[in-house]
Structures are given as C-alpha cells and as structure tokens.
Image: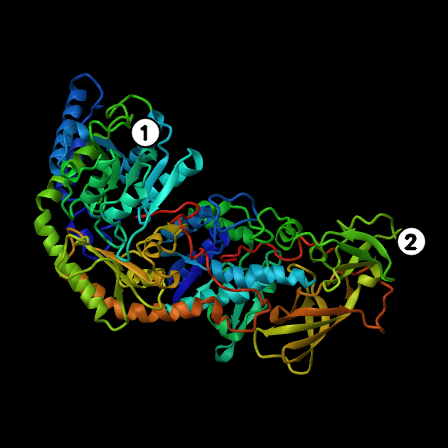
Amino acid sequence: MRVVAAMSGGVDSAVAAARMVEAGHEVVGVHLALSQNAATLRESVRGCCTIEDAGDARRVADMIGIPFYVWDMAARFKSDVVEDFIAEYAAGRTPNPCLRCNEKVKFAALLDKALALGFDAVATGHYAQIVERAFGARELHRAVDMAKDQSYVLGVLNEDQLARSFFPLGDTVKPQIRQEAAALGFNVAAKPDSHDICFIPDGDTRKWLTDRLGEQPGDIVDADGTTVGHHGGAYAFTVGQRRGLHLGQPAAGGEPRYVVEVQSGTNTVVVATGELLGIDVITGDHARWCGPAPRGVVSVGAQVRAHGEEIPATAWADGEQVEVRLQRRIRGVAPGQSVVLYDGTRVVGSATIARATASRGATSGGANSNEVTGNEVTSNAADSVSPTAG
Amino acid sequence: MLDSSAFTNFVYLDHGATTPMLPEAIEAMTAQMATVGNASSLHTSGRLGRRVVEESREAIARAMGARPSEVLFTSGGTESDNLAIKGTFWARKDADPRRVRILVSMVEHHAVLDCVEFLEAHEGAKITWLDVDQVGRVHPETVRAAIGTDPETVALVSVMWANNEVGTVQPIAEIAAVCREFAIPVHSDAVQAVGQVEVDFAGSGLDLLSISGHKIGGPQGVGALLARRDATLVPLTHGGGQERQVRSGSLDVPAIRGFAVAMRHATANRAVVTERLTGLRDKLIRGAQDAGFGVQVTGDWEPGDGIRRLPGNAHLLVPGCDGDSLLYLLDAAGVQCSTGSACQAGVPQPSHVLLAMGMSEHKARGALRLTLGHTSTAADVDAFLAALPAAVERAQRAQVATSPKQTSPKQTSPKQTSPKQTSPKQTSPKQTSPKQTI
C-alpha cells in the first residue's frame, strides 16, 4: 500500500514509519505543521511541532530512506482544535483537544489529503491496535502496553477511518520501541515523550485561557447559592477541580470543596464537598462509533479520561445521543470530556459528555472509597500524545 | 564520482535553486583541494594559493565587466547582499546621520528584505518600499518619486537584477542612472541573472552587485560582491583584513577557483545557452497552458524574449491547487521543481512577490516555479508536461480535502474558520521566523 507516515519528530512515530517500511509498504513521511509561527527549538517536553521536531522527523525519514514533506495544517488545527478548545472552555466545558485533533485533523484533513494525493492509508505512532475480523471488518483495540494505551483518544474514529489507518506500535511495549529506535540508529531514540497540550507549551492552561478570554471576575458559590469566593473567569475551572479556588474559609465540616459545576451563562463556579461530586449517569452527545452502533442496552466499560480507570457500565445509544449508567459512582466528570466505551479491549465508540449526574437509587455511601477524582484543568485533557503523529 | 548519469534518473527543473556543477569546475576545484596554502601566507604555498585567488578574481572581473579590485569574495549571495546593504547603510549614516532611508523593491529576495528589516528594527533605518507593476517590475520613475525632495536622507537603493520567483528582469541601468543623479549608492542582487542575461557591472552604473557561485555551475558556499572602488563599506566580519579590509576570513581557494571556472563558462556560452533555454521555457509554458487546467503564467512573458524575462524561468499558477501538493506529486513522478516562494519549516509561505504584484493570497497558493539550466533538455520539458495533468487533478482534490470550510461533521465551535494568515493591506513583504529561500 501507499502510506503516509505521520511523523512528529518523536520516537514513536519514527518507529511506526520504520515498521511500515519494513512491512513492505511504499511510505512517505509527513510532518504536520500545526502552528502558524513554529518556534525554532523545543522548549519543554510539552511543546512540539517546532522546527527542531520537523528536523528530527526529516532525519529519521532520511535514515529509513523515504521521501519526507511538511504539510501545513495550521489553519485547520487552529479552527478545528484550538478555537474549539477555547469555545468549549468559554462554555463551561472541559474539552479533550487530542480527540478533536484526531477526529478533525489527523484522521480527517491529513487522511483526506493523503487519499486525494493517491495514498491508501495513514500510519501514526499511536499506541492502539487494529484487529482485522472476517469480511475485512477492522476493530480498534487497546494497546498491549496499558501504560501507553492511546485508544481513548482514538475513540472518535469511524469504520472508514479505521479502514485507512495503521497503528504499528500497538503490539509492543514502549521500552521495546525505544530499543528498536536505538537499534535503527535514530537520534530520537531517547527523546522525551511529549505531555499535555501541545499548543500550550508551558502547561499553564488557565493562564493561556485568560490571555485569550480575558479576566471575567465572578462568584464562587456553594450548593445553597451562598457566595463563598471570587474568581477571574469561570472558564478557567473544571468540574472536580480542588486546587486554585482560594476560598476564604473551609466548609462547615472542614471537608475540602471541589468544583461541581461551571455555569458559563452567569459566570459562576459552584463548589461543594466531595459527595456531591460523585456521578453515575452520563449523557453524551456527538456519539462516534468505531464499528456498528450498539443496539439496545449493552454492557461496556466506560472511561472518562485518557488513562482513567475503566468502570463497568451499561450504555444505550440513540442516534448521536448516548446514556451511560456506571455501576459505581465516580468523581470529577466534566461536561465536554469524552466518555469512551470498551467491550473488553475493543473500543466501541465515544461521546462527548453533556451531563453527568447521580442517580437517586444508587448508593452514595462509598463516597470516598472507590471513586475516581482529581480533575485539574491542567491535566485532564491530554497525555503523551504528540499532536502531529502520536 | 559524479557524472552526467547522476542527473538522468530524474528530471531536474529547479536550476533557480541550484544548478549542477560544471565538470570543468569540479575538476579545477578538486585539483585545488589537493594542494596546501593559505592565500594570506607569505611563503611559496601561500603565494601559489594567492595566485589562484587573484587569477580567479581577474577572470570573474573580466566576465562581469568589473575591475579585479572591485571583486570581493564572500560565502555567497546572501552574504554579499548583507555586506552591500548593512555595510553601505552604516558607512553612509556614519558620514551623514540624516541618511537613514533605504529604498528597496517589494519583490526582493529575503537576503535583502530581511536585511533592511533588521536595519529598521535595530539601526534606525526607514524603509521606503518600491512598488512593482503587475509583472513585478520596478519603474525608474517609482525610484525617482521615492527619492523625492529629500535625496540627502537616502542611504542607498537596492533593486534586484532579475526576480528569483517570476523571472522579471528589472531596468537596472535606468534605475542606477536615476540614483546617480542624486549621488545615491545603488545595489543590485544579480544572483539569478548572471549567466542568463547580460550583466555588465561597469555598464550598469551600479555601485554594488551580488553574485553567487552555485547558480552558474560553480560550487555552493562561494560568491562575490562587486563593489566600486569608491564604495565605502563598514565590514560585517572583523579579523585578518582580507578582501579590502571588509570581509575578513581565510579565502576558500578551491571554491573560488571553481567559481571562476564556472563564471568563465557561463558568460562565454551565455548567448547560445539562453537562446536554447528561451525555446525550452516557451515550450514548457505553452504546453502547460495547453494542458487544459487554466494554467496561467505570471510575470512578463513573451515567446522568444529572453531579455525581459529570465530565459530559464517559467512560473505558473495552477487554479485550485496548492503548490506544495503539486511539488510532491511531481517529485513522486520524478520531476523536481519548486513553489518559488520562501518556506518556513518546510511549509511554503504565500509569496510576497506575487502579493506585491497584486495577486490574491488564494491564487498565489497554486504557484509552481520551473527553472531551466545548462543540463535541461526538451525531454525534461516533455516529462514535466506528461506528469502535469495527473498531478493537477490530484492536487485539486487534495485542496478540496484540506480546505477548512469543507469540514464534514457539524462543527462544535461556531468560531470563524478563515485560514487568512496575512492582512491583505500589508505594506511590507515581511514574514516572520526562520525561513529558507532558494
């Protein structure tokens, strides 16, 4: 096949490209320029897409003997990922830009351009597996290396996209990928993984958002509506967040308080103690199915953030809407995040969380036992995903 | 060893970026590399090296209509442009602090553009941009008008001899004559022009002229600034005082020798070569226009003319395509060419030359530059024309696929998705950040 290997300049996409060549495909390396003013050198492990990264990718392409080009996707990335990210936060939601980038840029704009130019598929360095079933059906599965598994951020891919995608690293653990890179003589063999959101190089999402949305002073209220503090912009808060609230006095019981709701309309942040944070019913929209849409109520595992825990659940899909009922409550589920549904290791699909609530009947006794908590605005979105290739 | 077969397994139509070295230049250069001798040393080996440098200087001077003492060796066109512009600006301003204006055309190479923008940002220079017409030509009257009523404030004027993207040849002698009236030094970047059109330094009336080795079949990394003996330049590099005290650094004797050999060939064979290239260029442009995609040629093209447009330059606009898609598809088909404009981290930027000529950014995206040189043949042109239709069809589909407006599923963000990057009313052809221009 004629394959575009998306090459970020990192070790994963380098080995992915090498494996595609090794497998006998006709491979062309492509680095995506996603920033309109790329920096010359990498400044931190967060940023990528610098000219240095493009140079690293180019050197790998030289070494494995494939043509190499840089494709300018900056306009698409800005409109479909960065502006979406800002708009979502402004609306009180917590988006995952990596899913958006995979959905709109890597497996849309990049794939579409590749197909138009005569390629058959795109290969990336994402840690996930595609399993071929009878009659050519392709399923998306978790990677064997659960520590690196990136199937969560690929949960937006549909059958057509999966049919045109290769994830050559999914069957291998990361340390082995680094060894393979070293054995191939790649300069990037020991290059650090990228973390967090690529377009916020210093990792300070709140400041980044404030620079773009401006200071918008407002109130922090408790569940009764009593003002307990003030903030500089509700958009900078995310459900489950505990730090950075700067509340003058503790709650009556002395328990820590968390953000339970961000009301963008009134620019209000609602806080409460932990038990109000637990939810077990998720309503999602913008459903995307990695295979046939499930019919009726199905048993699934639900994951609400990259590398989050998978919770047993049932799901019921109705068009673009999905209702997910978790078997136990979890904390810190923010609208805008994605819920990705699994059947064993298979990714069933995903939806964007519209509402997360607690069912009346469910037990709330174990409020602090098994719950997953700890959303912070800086850490819930992305993880170890290089935006150009994964 | 390189031989001509190295150029036969692909079609090379990017001679404007660099052209294959002439076998004679390779031979002379490699012979020189086997010898020892710093041209500044006083002993026998040094004198032998010095002799090669001076013979080369004389050869280049003869070919360019200059005196040997007017030839200053540099590392190439970019350094020559920098030395000419910064060196002259500082010298003129030192002599009279009122001289802060630099008159420069909108279509210059980045080696000139970024130089004057540096001087504006850091050295108090004021830039007066010289407009071009729709074929990219600067009119002498534009220069006169820009000099205006205060010629005493002008430090220098710089207008390229021929444009590297669209091949338009400027009326340099007329522009220089206007500057002479006001005793204003005038520089021209002739990197693309030498070997393609007649370039005569003395006859041009210029004070400063930049030339490069590798665009004429010499080695990369060497060039020269021709500077009249009365041109005062503040040096950019300080050290051993080589090259009239303005360009310190041990001379690259082998490269200089290769440069001189290439220069001799390029000028001796120019008339024959340019006639041949003009014919090939016209065939290429006609063929592309006849391919049925609405391909347009930019700049000043008239079949048979090799004086107003560089004989080896064909610059095309292909509707509905991104130049870089075309470049990839043609490369994959074995045909190498360029989009013509500067790139930033491998991404071609909208051409400041085309924008200055009044073209829309959208239209400028489909630019493709094909440049012919001494190894070009009719078969090369045929191969390009054969590869073009399939490339255009695919590139058109690719542009549709990546256009931000076409996004398939419904947008979650209602934000403006226009990909506009530069404002349409820009006054300077400025671009930001690192870029490479060839």
Q: Residue furthest top?
A: B43
In the rendered structure, find residue B92 and report the number of the disc placed on it. 1
The chain identifier of the residue carrying mark 1 reads B
Residue sitting nearer the eye, A347 or A85: A85
Mark 2 vs mark 1: give the one in front: 1
Task: Estimate the x, y position of residue A294 in percent, counting from the top left.
Answer: 63, 79
Q: Nearer the viewer, residue B70 or A224?
A: B70
For the residues labelled 2 and 1, say whether their Cβ atoms are less than 8 Å apart. no
- Tell me the kind of residue under disc 2: Ala
**Residue in the foreground of this view, choosing between B231 and A187:** B231
Q: How packed is label 1: few (under 14 Cα within 10 Å), some, or many (20 or more)? A: many
Q: What crowding class fits label 2: few (fewer than 14 Cα within 10 Å), some (14-19), or many (20 or more)?
A: few
| Residue B144 in the image: above or below residue A321 | above
Q: What element carries label 1?
A: helix
Residue A222 location, quadrant: bottom right
Relative side of A28 to B385, left or right: right
Colour pattern: rainbow
In the rendered picture of this protein, how many numbered marks are placed on residues?
A: 2
Residue at horizontal 40 percent and vertical 67 percent from the top: B399
**Tag 1: amino acid:** Arg
Mark 2 lies on a secondary structure that is loop
Judging by the rendered image, the residue that carries numbered circle 2 is A252
Q: Can residue B1 be seen in this view?
A: no
Residue B55 horizontal/vertical position (percent): 12, 29
Q: In which quarter of the image is residue A95?
A: bottom right
How far apart in space, not on screen, are marks 2 and 1 (Cα)? 77 Å
Using the rendered image, report if marks 2 and 1 lie on a common chain: no
Q: Which chain carries label 2?
A: A
Q: Position of residue B246 (x, y in %)?
A: 28, 26
